[in-house]
């Protein structure tokens, strides 16, 4: 007789899991996977990780581990999963989620806010569902996270939902391992809240209907969202858009538009596959795409080819569109230009006089977070502003296991900061705005304190821009943080790009084109070719030929002054260029005629961004710059419809001289060549000059990798042209994919350079 088969051996293992594993439904998902395979044990959070014990047959335990890796929640990110064998227990009965525990000095990654999921949207629209019409429906797979979490480990008492006790029905779902809301900390319903409120002229039976009626009537509504207040109005109503521009003091900067769904998006922008994928991603960013010319008045994005569009991403947004229909809405940050977004009800006075009504709610926002913006590149979505849906997730940085925590303060416009520890993670803040505003500085300080607390790391070193006039530089000086390190602006841009691609150990030539950066010679750089052999070193191997900004910052706002300086340098009589002459006027011309030849009050620069501004003024495209990059953006929009001619810079020893192009552009204007063709010709000339100079510098240094960074490379016509030409020459070309090419990515480079300097100092001490 054969013996009776023995029962499979029971094993027990402990898992320690790190990454984005709190606030994303990780414990409930793990519990469901374990229960499905008949494995017992428990799971709990501490401040830094998720820990669980699994007991069952080896095959079943292995299946659970594989399921955790493969079938975790959509917003989870496992960075580490450590497995240890432990002794089996006799008292296991099923699988349980147990209470969070203290201990562990580490901190888990704080998850970003994510868009409403399809399951919640379906329930909210189902009259038979108990959450029908609930403006705050959420589950473990969607909803606010970063903006409501006050402490870790992530549990309801340490979120802004702590003031909303669960009703019996929600409590039952919260405790049911088979429910999608099992341990969903933001769980809520119509009975337990939160609740909307309305303040404004429209009368209606409920706050939402009041807001809908106000919007239908062409009013401006301040709408409290996930990360702050928006200002909303109909995007198809020229009167409403004009009123919003006037009240917000935003004469030309484009507004973003929110639509109900993909079909509505396809009515206002051209819907390529990558556009749809970006719009429907969990981050739900604003996506820049070519406009169709339908559904949205020109005043929403005057003079531009692209329109920024996003889908409704919160329950309140969806409920608005369910009543409004397919009407697109302008959805822009609730602030006056230059000031931070309003996110606390107590600060609504900051936008007094702008909105006709306010649709608010009683769930507090703990930290503000603006909408993210992406453009569509050859490899999909490319960040223009990295904020909601992405922040405060870190960028991984190759770094040793020692060294102090570094705070990098970024720049003064599009400000973001980075907090980097020795663990190789640079936590990137959400978009902070313009640091010139004292309210932004206060918000910046609060955000630094909050992220330092949430990540469990206090900075000992602060890295800032080398520009002595930057507000972020002044903030660093008065921060009280132990040591301050100044980082050259374009060096930081270059290293941020190399960090993204894990090329810190690769000698690279980096083309850094932007508007303003303080150079090592005390002048304003912005058209630079930098050889970067290692993160802490660079050399300037090429640049745009210098010209002047007559009147300094005044020339940035009135680029005709720069155009006249370039004409003077090119030996072209000013009366050959009527557009900049008309822009400065008789009085201005009299001053500039004395100022420019003598160089009095003229700030030298090599800025490619300022050259674009000057050409836009020379061609009559833009004479009054009211937002950063306006002239260049409008010039690119016109260039896309033109046919380029053969204009060429003079390139010698790495210096790109634009004066031959200036002369030929003037000739083109006098010969009545179309402005679109001249704009396209200028773009072509910049592309060719960059390729010639970069190719020569790279060959001389024996470098095979070239990077493209800086705010000018938001110009996709320029970016694609240079990248393609360099790729044709067999270079490995790096462009941004994780952080913006503009100053929104600057802090990452600052932090990495500071870390490299500290590491070198340590090596020197040990030598």
Image (cartoon, rainbow, N blue to C red):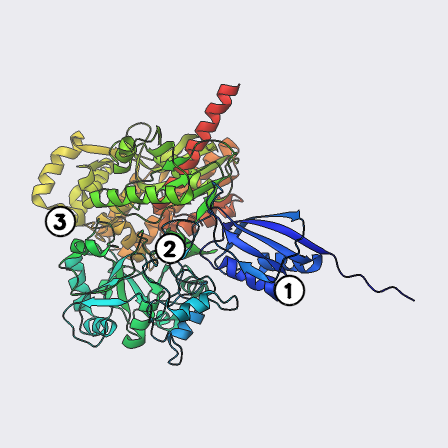
How far apart are labels 1 and 3 at the CA level?
80 Å
As rendered, which of 90 and 509 lies closer to the eye? 90
**Disc 1 versus disc 3: nearer the observer:** 1
Q: Which residue is mark 2?
A: 157
Residue 327 horizontal/vertical position (percent)? 28, 73
Q: How many marks?
A: 3
The residue located at (38%, 31%) in the rendering is 461
Q: Compare marks 3 and 2 and give the one earlier in the sequence.
A: 2
Q: Which residue is mark 3?
A: 582
Q: Secondary structure at mark 3?
A: helix
Residue 129 horizontal/vertical position (percent)? 40, 77
For the question of whether residue 191 can be seen, the reply is yes
As rendered, which of 427 and 710 lies closer to the eye? 427
* Residue farthest to the left, as pictured: 587
Q: Which quarter shows the N terminus? A: bottom right
Q: Which residue is mark 1?
A: 38
Q: Compare marks 1 and 3 and give the one earlier in the sequence.
A: 1
When the figure is inspected, residue 430 is found, relative to residue 354, above or below; the finding is above
Q: Residues within 10 Å of mark 2 (few under 14, many from 20)?
A: some
Q: Residues within 10 Å of mark 3 (few under 14, many from 20)?
A: some
The quarter of the picture where residue 227 lies is bottom left
As rendered, which of 381 and 715 lies closer to the eye? 381
Q: Compare marks 2 and 1 and give the one earlier in the sequence.
A: 1
Q: Secondary structure at mark 2?
A: helix
For the question of whether residue 611 can be seen, the reply is no
How far apart are labels 3 and 2 at the CA level?
63 Å
When the figure is inspected, residue 41 is found, relative to residue 212, above or below; the finding is above
Q: Residues within 10 Å of mark 1 (few under 14, many from 20)?
A: some
Answer left or right for 286 relative to 733: left
How far apart are labels 2 and 1 at the CA level?
32 Å
Q: Are marks 3 and 2 in contact (CB under 8 Å)?
A: no
């Amino acid at each position: 007789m054969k013996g009776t088969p023995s029962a499979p051996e029971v094993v027990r293992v402990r898992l320690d899991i790190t990454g984005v594993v709190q606030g994303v439904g990780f414990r409930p998902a793990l519990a469901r996977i374990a229960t499905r395979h008949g494995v017992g044990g428990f799971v709990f959070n501490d401040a830094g990780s998720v820990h669980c014990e699994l007991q069952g047959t080896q095959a079943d335990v292995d299946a659970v581990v594989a399921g955790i890796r493969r079938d975790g929640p959509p917003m989870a990110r496992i960075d580490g999963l450590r497995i240890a064998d432990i002794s089996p227990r006799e008292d296991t009965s099923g699988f349980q989620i147990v209470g969070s525990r203290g201990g562990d000095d580490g901190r888990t990654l704080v998850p970003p806010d994510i868009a409403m999921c399809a399951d919640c949207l379906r329930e909210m629209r189902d009259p038979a569902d108990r959450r029908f019409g609930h403006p705050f429906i959420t589950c473990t797979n969607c909803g606010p996270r970063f903006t409501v979490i006050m402490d870790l480990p992530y549990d309801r008492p340490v979120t802004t939902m702590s003031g909303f006790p669960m009703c019996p029905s929600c409590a039952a779902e919260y405790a049911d391992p088979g429910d999608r809301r099992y341990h969903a900390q933001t769980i809520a319903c119509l009975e337990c809240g939160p609740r909307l409120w309305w303040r404004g002229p429209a009368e209606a039976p409920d706050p939402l209907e009041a807001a809908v009626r106000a919007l239908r009537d062409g009013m401006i509504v301040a709408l409290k969202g996930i990360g702050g207040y928006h200002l909303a109005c109909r995007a198809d109503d020229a009167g409403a858009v004009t009123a919003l521009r006037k009240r917000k003091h935003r004469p030309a900067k484009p507004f973003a538009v929110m639509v109900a769904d993909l079909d509505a998006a396809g009515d206002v922008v051209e819907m390529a596959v990558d556009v749809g994928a970006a719009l429907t991603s969990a981050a739900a960013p604003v996506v820049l795409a070519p406009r169709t010319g339908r559904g949205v008045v020109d005043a929403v994005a005057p003079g531009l080819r692209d329109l920024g569009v996003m889908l409704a991403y919160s329950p309140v947004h969806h409920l608005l569109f369910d009543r409004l229909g397919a009407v697109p809405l302008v959805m822009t940050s609730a602030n006056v230009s230059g000031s931070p977004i309003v996110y606390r009800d107590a600060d609504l006075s900051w936008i007094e006089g702008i909105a006709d009504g306010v649709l608010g709610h009683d769930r507090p926002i703990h930290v503000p977070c603006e909408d993210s913006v992406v453009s569509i590149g050859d490899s999909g979505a490319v960040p223009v502003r990295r904020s909601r849906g992405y922040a405060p997730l870190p960028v991984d940085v190759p770094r040793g296991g020692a060294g102090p925590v570094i705070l990098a303060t970024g720049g003064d416009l599009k400000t973001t900061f980075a907090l980097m520890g020795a663990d190789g993670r640079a936590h990137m803040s959400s978009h902070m705005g313009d640091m010139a505003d004292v309210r932004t500085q206060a918000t910046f300080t609060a955000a630094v304190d909050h992220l330092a607390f949430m990540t469990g790391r206090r900075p000992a070193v602060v890295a800032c821009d080398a520009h002595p006039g930057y507000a972020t530089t002044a903030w660093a000086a008065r921060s009280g943080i132990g040591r301050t390190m100044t980082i050259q602006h374009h060096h930081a841009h270059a290293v941020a790009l190399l960090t993204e691609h894990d090329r810190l150990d690769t000698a690279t030539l980096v083309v850094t084109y932007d508007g303003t950066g303080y150079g090592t010679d005390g002048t304003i750089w912005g058209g630079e070719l930098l050889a970067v052999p290692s993160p802490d070193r660079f050399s300037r191997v090429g640049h745009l030929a210098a010209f002047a900004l007559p009147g300094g910052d005044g020339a940035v706002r009135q680029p005709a002054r720069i155009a006249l300086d370039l004409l003077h340098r090119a030996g072209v009589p000013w009366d050959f260029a009527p557009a900049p002459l008309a822009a400065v006027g008789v009085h201005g011309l009299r001053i500039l005629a004395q100022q420019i030849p003598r160089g009095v009050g003229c700030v030298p620069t090599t800025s490619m961004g300022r050259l674009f501004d000057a050409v836009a003024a020379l061609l009559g495209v833009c004479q009054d710059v009211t937002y950063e990059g306006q002239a260049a953006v409008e010039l690119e929009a016109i260039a896309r419809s033109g046919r380029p001619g053969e204009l060429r810079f003079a390139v010698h020893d790495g210096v790109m001289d634009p004066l031959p192009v200036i002369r030929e552009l003037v000739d083109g204007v006098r010969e009545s060549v179309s402005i679109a063709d001249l704009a396209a010709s200028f773009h072509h000339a910049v592309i060719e000059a960059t390729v010639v100079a970069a190719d020569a510098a790279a060959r001389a240094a024996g470098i095979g990798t070239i990077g493209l960074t800086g705010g000018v490379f938001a110009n996709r016509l320029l970016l694609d042209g240079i990248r393609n030409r360099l790729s044709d020459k067999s270079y490995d070309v790096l462009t941004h994919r994780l952080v913006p090419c503009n100053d929104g990515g600057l802090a990452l480079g600052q932090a990495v350079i500071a870390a490299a300097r500290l590491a070198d100092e340590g090596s020197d001490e040990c030598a």
